[in-house]
């Protein structure tokens, strides 16, 4: 990119046309997207400081009520210093339990033990924060639940997509490759509503799966409206978003480098961790970001498979803008959610990966 | 030459069987859905014999037909506008240099990363505010003259469709050597001719691919549409959601099967069109790599553009 631009600048006279004003090309589209995304986004921030109007809408009277409700007032009665202690204990316990597999994995992959311990500590911190957020108030609990379920979905998606990406890219015939890819893309192009409904139908209490279970002489299982159903739905709807970028990255992996590493005596797990993973990292980052952002803001999956009223952030938003008619409170939740999402994106995706993502 | 170690054969077997499982996971729920849309038994997941009565019932359902017509109309209009705006945007970002380019780029890709649910509620607030003010301006006689409906859905759909078109077109602009366009202009073609004769034919697969993506996204969109559709205008996903939220019935299976079939057809159509267009293109212009920027490459580019300009009627 840089080289091309420099060359264009150096070529002098022939570049005049390219230095023409961008405004006429840029203005209509940019304006349209700003009207639909930037201005309403700013409006949401303004609404979060206003007074709710009965039956929806706002009264133009400034107040901090909504933010106080989310941050301070909505606190659960039992949330106190005891919760902090419990969260700390939970974090330490999680880190201790997680340390066994992470240290073993670090050893196996030929990494330093400290990295395994560091990862276990990170998981422990996450568990502690999750415990705190779940116990603090209903809003933070919904946020924590959405994030944790989406993280689970992301991990499962990686585990399913990685072997598939390797499998497709290691086919030698281009026809087979294309057929396998199209089979993934069909799922990608199918309406989210239909995909979610397919899972709902399959798992229903009197659905085909339960009939099969009964025919085998076992008891019916309640699948719907459980955490399992929601995470399964998140994985089912988001998996193509992990497979496609990961496949694109796997396709670019230099097989010769992996062979060389193997010839130089690296064990297979080391080849995987030190040669393969760094090469597919950009695709992996794109996939993780896509799956996580899609999952954490899912509305259809928690509504159709979770059943409850405030399963995830999207349900909370719909409740405030719909039945509860507290638009400022909903606006505050939406503003907080956007800030958290964009901050998370900014922190996890570097500039390089951003280029890759776009 | 390379000795296959048993551990590797085991790894390949594991990868292969995991992949098969992923495909089973993808297709079993949809296959079951399709199968049971032909199920005679009204309730439950038990097979009661083959029938197509649920499909014929669909075509008598006026609400569903109206919703489907709305969806198609909205998708066609949104795609048409988005293809023009998105192509213009990608040309501006990739072929022009201007101040604030990075910022413009980030705004353009906002629809790709912004959570849909936030966009939905933000648009609900925005439209009810602006439409309320406009109704006030129109005076008391026209109470609620302007309401949310097809126009607001189209405005919202154009925005995200534009972003996705820009994304797809830009990736095909990146593979087009700018020296082709420069050469055309050196030979006296103005910017307009250069675009129609050189740039557009070369990025056509991207433009068509973007258009089909935009069409599908508009047709399938649920969350944003849910918040900006008024009582007057529902789209197919909104109507179907209303039904399947309440009940699990063979009719819902039938309509879901039809939607699944339609999107599969769209995908196949997209792939066929893209491969045809890119084959035609590769016959017309010799592909040039963007890397070699020397005299010889420039000369070849000039020649290629020359032949192309003269070769067209």
Image (cartoon, rainbow, N blue to C red):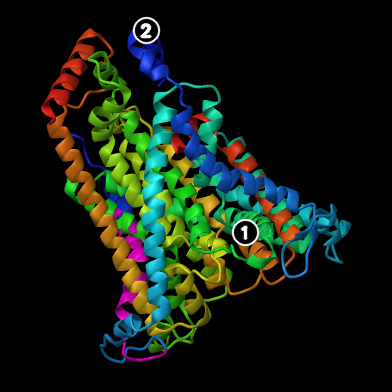
Q: Quadrant of the C terminus of chain B?
A: top left
Q: Where residue A214 sits in the image (x, y, percent)?
A: 42, 88
Q: Is residue A204 left or right of residue B311?
A: right
Residue depicted at 32% across the width and 34% down the height: B172
- Say what secondary structure mark 2 lies in: helix
Which residue does the numbered mark 1 point to in the structure image?
B124
Classify A250 as above or below B75. above
Q: Is residue A157 left or right of residue B33?
A: right
Which quadrant of the structure image shows residue B123? Answer: bottom right
Classify B42 as above or below B105. below
Residue A218 is inside the magenta segment: no
Q: Is residue A50 left or right of residue B117?
A: right
Residue depicted at 74% across the width and 56% down the height: A133
Q: CA distance from mark 1 to mark 2?
A: 50 Å
Tell me which segment is drawn in magenta: B16-43
Classify B312 as above or below A100. above
Both labels 1 and 2 in a single chain: no
- Dot 1 and dot 2 residues touching (CB under 8 Å): no
Q: Where residue B275 sits in the image (x, y, percent)?
A: 20, 44
Classify B151 as above or below B65. above
Which quadrant of the structure image shows residue B124? Answer: bottom right
Residue depicted at 26% across the width and 9% down the height: B294
Q: Which one is in front, A357 or A259?
A: A357
Q: Chain of mark 1?
A: B
Which quadrant of the structure image shows residue A274? Answer: top left
Q: Chain of mark 2?
A: A
Q: Which one is in front, A95 or A19?
A: A19
Q: Where residue B239 sits in the image (x, y, percent)?
A: 47, 73
Q: What predominant SS class does the magenta segment belong to? A: helix
Which residue does the numbered mark 2 point to in the structure image?
A12
């Amino acid at each position: 990119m840089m080289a091309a631009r420099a060359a264009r600048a150096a070529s002098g006279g022939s570049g005049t046309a390219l230095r023409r004003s961008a405004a006429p090309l840029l203005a209509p589209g940019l304006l349209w997207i700003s009207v639909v995304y930037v201005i309403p986004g700013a409006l949401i921030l303004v609404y979060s400081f206003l007074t709710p109007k009965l039956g929806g809408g706002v009264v133009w009277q400034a107040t901090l009520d909504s933010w106080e409700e989310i941050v301070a007032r909505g606190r659960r009665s039992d949330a106190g210093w005891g919760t902090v202690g419990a969260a700390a204990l939970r974090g330490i316990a999680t880190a201790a339990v997680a340390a066994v597999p992470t240290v073993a994995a670090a050893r196996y992959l030929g990494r330093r033990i400290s990295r395994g311990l560091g990862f276990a500590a990170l998981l422990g911190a996450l568990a502690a924060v999750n415990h705190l957020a779940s116990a603090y108030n209903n809003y933070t609990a919904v946020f924590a639940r959405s994030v944790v379920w989406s993280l689970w979905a992301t991990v499962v998606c990686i585990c399913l997509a990685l072997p598939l990406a390797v499998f497709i890219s290691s086919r030698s015939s281009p026809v087979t490759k294309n057929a396998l890819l199209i089979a993934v893309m069909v799922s990608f192009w199918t309406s989210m509503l239909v995909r979610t409904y397919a899972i709902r139908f399959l798992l229903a209490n009197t659905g085909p799966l339960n009939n099969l279970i009964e025919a085998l002489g076992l008891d019916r299982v309640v699948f719907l409206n459980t955490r399992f159903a929601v995470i399964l739905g998140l994985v089912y709807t988001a998996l193509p978003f992990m497979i496609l970028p990961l496949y694109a990255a796997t396709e670019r992996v230099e097989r010769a480098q992996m062979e060389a590493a193997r010839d130089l005596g690296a064990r297979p797990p080391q080849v995987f961790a030190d040669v393969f993973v760094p090469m597919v990292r950009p695709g992996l980052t794109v996939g993780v970001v896509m799956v996580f952002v899609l999952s954490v803001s899912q509305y259809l999956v928690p509504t159709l498979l979770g059943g409850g009223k405030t399963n995830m952030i999207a349900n909370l938003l719909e409740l405030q803008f719909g039945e509860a008619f507290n638009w400022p409170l909903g606006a505050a939740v939406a503003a907080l959610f956007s800030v958290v999402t964009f901050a998370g994106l900014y922190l996890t995706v570097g500039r390089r990966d951003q280029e890759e993502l776009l | 030459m390379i000795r296959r170690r048993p551990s590797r054969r085991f790894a390949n077997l594991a990868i292969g069987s995991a992949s098969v499982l992923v495909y089973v996971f993808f297709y079993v729920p949809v296959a079951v859905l399709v199968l049971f849309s032909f199920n005679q038994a009204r309730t439950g997941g038990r097979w009661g014999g083959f029938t197509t009565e649920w499909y014929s019932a669909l075509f008598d359902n006026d609400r569903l037909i109206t919703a489907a017509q709305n969806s198609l109309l909205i998708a066609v209009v949104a795609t048409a506008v988005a293809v023009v705006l998105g192509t213009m945007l990608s040309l501006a970002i990739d072929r022009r240099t201007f101040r604030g380019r990075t910022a413009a780029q980030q705004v353009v890709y906002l629809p790709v990363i912004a959570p849909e649910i936030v966009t939905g509620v933000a648009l609900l607030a925005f439209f009810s505010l602006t439409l309320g003010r406009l109704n006030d301006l129109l005076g008391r006689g026209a109470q609620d003259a302007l309401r949310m409906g097809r126009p607001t859905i189209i405005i919202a759909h154009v925005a995200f469709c534009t972003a996705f078109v820009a994304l797809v077109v830009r990736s095909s602009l990146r593979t087009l050597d700018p020296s082709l366009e420069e050469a055309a202009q050196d030979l006296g073609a103005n910017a307009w001719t250069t675009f129609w004769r050189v740039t557009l034919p070369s990025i056509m697969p991207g433009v068509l691919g973007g258009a089909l993506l935009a069409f599908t996204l508009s047709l399938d969109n649920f969350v944003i549409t849910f918040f900006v559709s008024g009582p007057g205008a529902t789209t197919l996903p909104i109507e179907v959601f209303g039904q399947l939220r309440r009940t699990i019935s063979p009719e819902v299976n039938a309509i879901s099967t039809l939607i699944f079939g339609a999107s599969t057809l769209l995908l196949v159509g997209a792939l066929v069109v893209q491969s045809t267009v890119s084959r035609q293109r590769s016959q017309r212009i010799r592909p040039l790599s963007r890397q070699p920027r020397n005299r010889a490459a420039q000369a070849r580019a000039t020649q290629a553009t020359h032949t192309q300009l003269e070769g067209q009627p």
